[in-house]
Each structure stands twice: as C-alpha cells, then as structure tokens.
Amino acid sequence: MSYTLINRILSLDNRNLSSLFKPVQLEILKKIENGSSLTENEKRYLRGGLRKKLDSLQALTINVNTNFNNLATMLGLLGEYYITGYEALKQNGFGWYFESKRIFIMNTRLEGRLHVDGRAIVLKRVKSIGKHGWTTDKKSGLKYATNARIIKDALRFHQDDILKTCIDFLQRYGKMFVSRPEQYAHLLPKALIIENPQDFRV
C-alpha cells in the first residue's frame, strides 16, 4: 500500500473525496495516515472494496503520469468498462470534428473524475455494463458505446448536450445512426415527428 497515495487522496477537496469513498472508508484512510491502529472490522474493509479502490487508483495514477497516451492500458485496469458520450460518437463516425474536453467512462469499479492535460476523465460506476450496447475497436482494443447506448446513458445521467447532439444525428441519419429509430420518436421535437418513424431517411 502506498502511503504517498493516501496522502494525495486525503489532500483532495471533500466533493472529490465523497464521490470516490464512503465515509467509513475515509475514516480508515485518515487512521492509516495518522498511524492509528485499525479495528478488526476496519481491517476487513481494508482487505475488501477499499483495497480494490486503492489499487485501482494507484495503477491509474502511474499510467496517467507516465503513459496516458496508452488509454487501452489505463482502462484495462478498470476491468469492465466502455467509453460513452462524444468520444464514442466520434469513434462511431458521427461528429468526428468534436474536440471534447471530457471522456465519459462507464465502469464497474470507480466513481469520480481525473483531470489530465486539460481533459476530464469522468468515471461513472454501474453494477454491470451488460453484454450489449458496446463494441471493442479492433485497432485500439478500447470499448465504445453504440449510438443507442450513448442515448440511453445521456438520458440516465441528464447529459442534455450529448442528448441534443444525438437527436440531431437521429433526425439527419435515421437508420444509419441507430438500427431502430422509431424507438426514439418520443425524443424528437413534435413538429418533426412523422407518422411512420421507421421511414426515417438521410
């Protein structure tokens, strides 16, 4: 365990700390920093989920500092994940001109935010990423959300800017954007809804 990492974690502001750690986990970290003895229950926490978080943060810190360009290596440490939002839209061939300052990553291990080279890596923790709704890019090995999953994520996390962009693409490209555009007719402005949404065309 890295005591330097614990010191760095505890130097974060409360908002970042509360998004990454539960109150009981923070108390354990503070006790470790102060050299205080842990109770048996606290030791169990340290052997379980808290240890996994610390190991993941340590691994992420090493990769962010030394080789952030190798995004596949960094994200591989998260286990189950996929990239969503604008980065995934670009990967899927829509909005290739976007220069997003945030990379949204759905994963099963960490919740929080990292700032690297002026870009925010936003980690959203979910119980499971499921078997569908994302694909692996053969060249990079990175996992990206499908357009349908990007819409679902934008609705779930109230990302209105991404949702509006998806609706624009849906109106323009129809079945080229998602396989079943009729499922999203309720998202379109009323004036643009047609009687047979399955007839959407480019």
Image (cartoon, rainbow, N blue to C red):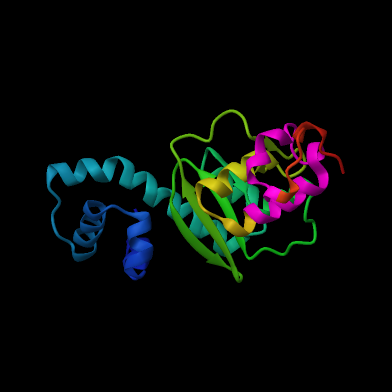
Between 194 and 17, the one lying in front of the other is 194
Task: Judge from the rendering whether residue 94 lies leftward or rightward of residue 77; answer left or right.
Answer: right
Task: Judge from the rendering whether residue 8 lies leftward or rightward of residue 157; answer left or right.
Answer: left
* Residue 62, percent from left and from top: 51, 58
- For image coordinates 32% across by 59% down, the residue present is 18
* Residue 123, percent from left and from top: 50, 52
Residue 33 falls in image quadrant: bottom left
Residues rendered magenta in the picture: 163-190
Task: Judge from the rendering whether residue 120 lies leftward or rightward of residue 88; answer left or right.
Answer: left
Between 66 and 198, the one lying in front of the other is 198
* Residue 186, percent from left and from top: 63, 41
Task: Judge from the rendering whether residue 20 lies leftward or rightward of residue 134; answer left or right.
Answer: left
Is 137 in the magenta?
Answer: no
- For image coordinates 19% across by 65% down, the residue present is 34
Between 162 and 49, the one lying in front of the other is 162
- For image coordinates 77% across by 56% down, the residue present is 95
Between 58 and 129, the one lying in front of the other is 129
Is residue 146 at least partly visible in the picture?
Answer: no
Is 165 in the magenta?
Answer: yes
Is residue 127 at least partly visible in the picture?
Answer: yes
Is the stretch drawn in magenta largely helix, strand or loop? helix
* Residue 189, percent from left and from top: 68, 51
- Please identify the quadrant where the C terminus is shown: top right
Up the image or down, 56 lies above or below 115; here it is above
